[in-house]
Amino acid sequence: MKSAIDRNDRWVYDLVLKADRPEVGRMDDYLEDVKRKHDSYVNYLPIETGRIQPVVLDSWARCRGSAVDPKAGTGSPLPHDEIARRREFNRSLVQVASSQMHAMYSTVRGSGFVVNLIDRDGYILDMVGDPEIVYNARALNFEVGSNWSELAVGTNAISLALDNCSPVQVAGAEHYCYSHHTWTCSAAPICGPDGVLIGVLNMSAPARFRHPHTLGMIISGASSIQAQLQLLYQSEQVARSRDKLSAILESVSEGLLCVDNQGRVTRINSRLAHQLGVVPEQMYGADITSLGIPRAVLRELTTGCSLRYRELQLPTPRGSTTFYISAEPVHEPMQLEQEFILVFHGTKKTRRLVHQVMGNRAHYTFSRLITHDPRLQEAVSLGRTVAYIDSSVVLQGESGTGKEIFAQAIHNEGPRRSEPFVAINCAAIPRELMESELFGYEAGAFSGANKNGSIGKFELADGGTLFLDELAEMAMDLQVKLLRVLQEKVLYRVGGKQAIPVDVRIIAASNKNLAKCVGEGSFREDLYYRLNVFNIALPALRERREDIRLLAKHFLTQFSEQHARPVSGFTEDAMEHMLAHRWPGNVRELQNVVERAIMTARGSAVELSDLPDYLHAAESDGGCLDRPNSIRDAERSAIEHALDDNDGNVTRAARQLRIGRNTLYRKLRKYGITSAGR
């Protein structure tokens, strides 16, 4: 509705102010004057405009220009189904206006008035009034479903209010069509919450009842409808926001809890309610302590602290369950009581995030293991088999033989492949810290501990695999606790009393003979048999010499690309020395030697001079035990080493060298080796 008073509004304004003055008090004289001027106008005679409203004169001109017949002015109402469609489209307007229309009619009941509601297209949506006046109005099709736009029925208050979005009163011959001259109509526009015109409120009566107070009543009624529509809109917006919030709370994959600054629950989503075993509707207004949440959490929040993945043990239908809680205050300027949203992260999802950050993932597979050695191939075959058997595995082999790589391959081959792979070196962590590393600790468990406590490797590996490297170095007292966790599948954090269930597969590794350690009393026999369900031995690199050449070429390609070095091979002399070396550091040593060689190589091939000095030491310096002077020396050295490795057993030595036993006997005679055992 316009706030400024235009030229016609000023006319109406003056009319209302002068309503009791003598010069405008005689309505009959005014109506007669207007009628004479109307008759002259429709007959194309000149007129004096006098007191005729400017908007009425403008409308008469439009009607003449649009060839509206002043002797017509009636039309047929819409079909019932179209009326119903329009009422449904304007449902809020009809519902809100209905009570206002009845309230207005109750003040003029029996006075010959009718109140109606019109949509923005000029169609009457609703109507209430004296039965006699309603009946007479139907003769002019002034009923629900009729169109009262200017083009349809000529000048009238309804059309003027729609066209000018301004209140107006049209009486008697101010109507362009003769059939409406016996009526006076007062109309005011109705705008929606967005300020856009949506309809008109109108009150009609016989022309003799023309009075400016009627227009004032209509303006007041339209304003009241607008105010109620605004309240309805705001209420719907609040409800829509509430529904949207509920939809958001229900759609997230985490548990959500809203609490006020008194610790009372204001909202809980169904996911968290299900996890905690409560009914959402019964939790509104409940104290957070009823859910097992300590009030210390609320005190932290009300002092301005934010929680980030705070660990809490809460009672659930499945027993005490660990949750990680994050919380933030909700800042609303007009809100008297501050609220907080608590997000309950499940342990698995939280730990999966930790694994992504910490890189607790297995990267190697059996397909990435490079070998032609039958014993390592046999170990791979056994590893593929045990991968699908959820039992403990012990990997035995010298340092550098790839025990962790093999453990990762077992993990990636089995059903736990999508779960974490967590490794811990039992020899690299001080004895006094090893227990907390494995099992975690509670807040305040010991001096210097994290104030919020910490989870251990067992919990991090829950659902996946825990790789215990250098297991033989674990202290005896810790072996007892490890055995208990493996047997009971629950653990207790250091300083804690809460039993925490864990589902972890153990793969252990040692460069020592665990059976021998048991005999020496440095390793518990019961733990050994609990872990040693499957024992896989990984041969040393010197025991699979054919793999030396294979691995050296693989590492050469890998590091040449990585360091952008144009090195494509080894000279024959360099490869002979590499084949003859005993490689006490195994594959790890070979890898380091090759990487160093390609960085120092001056040509396209690695030469002997590019290898470390200990691989080609001068004989004057005592020589290198494994340095060959020729292919012949390399073969002799390989035979001697094979015999030494197998305590002089020719059959096993031949198998290690991958040659026949008769061939080996022939070479023994060739090189004059007589110390071999038979």
Image (cartoon, helix red, strand yellow):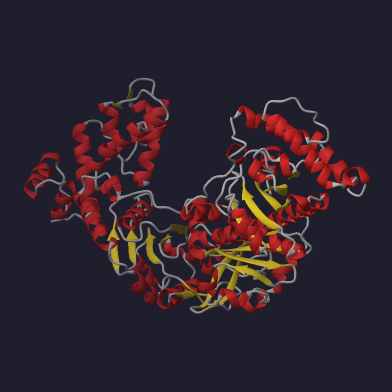
Q: Please give the name of the residue rendered at 35% of the width and 74% of the height, measured from the top-left corner.
A: 530
* Residue 634 in the image, given as x and y percentages of width and height: 22, 36
Q: Nearer the viewer, residue 624 or 199?
A: 199
Rendered position, 118 above or below 55 = below
Q: Is residue 425 visible?
A: yes
Q: Where, quadrant-wise, is the N terminus in this rendering?
A: top right
Q: Please give the name of the residue rendered at 33% of the width and 21% of the height, measured from the top-left corner.
A: 604
Residue furthest toward the left? 662
Q: Please give the name of the residue rendered at 52% of the width and 47% of the height, measured from the top-left corner.
A: 76
Q: Nearer the viewer, residue 109 or 374?
A: 109
Quadrant in the rendering for residue 468:
bottom left
Rendered position, 548 above or below 478 = above
Rendered position, 373 above or below 313 = above
* Residue 268 in the image, given as x and y percentages of width and height: 59, 68
* Residue 103 in the image, given as x and y percentages of width and height: 73, 64
Rendered position, 3 above or below 398 = above
Quadrant in the rendering for residue 93:
bottom right
User: Number of labelled discs?
Assistant: 0
Q: Nearer the viewer, residue 598 or 258?
A: 258
Q: Is residue 327 visible?
A: no
Q: Is residue 100 left or right of residue 346?
A: right
* Residue 537 in the image, given as x and y percentages of width and height: 28, 58
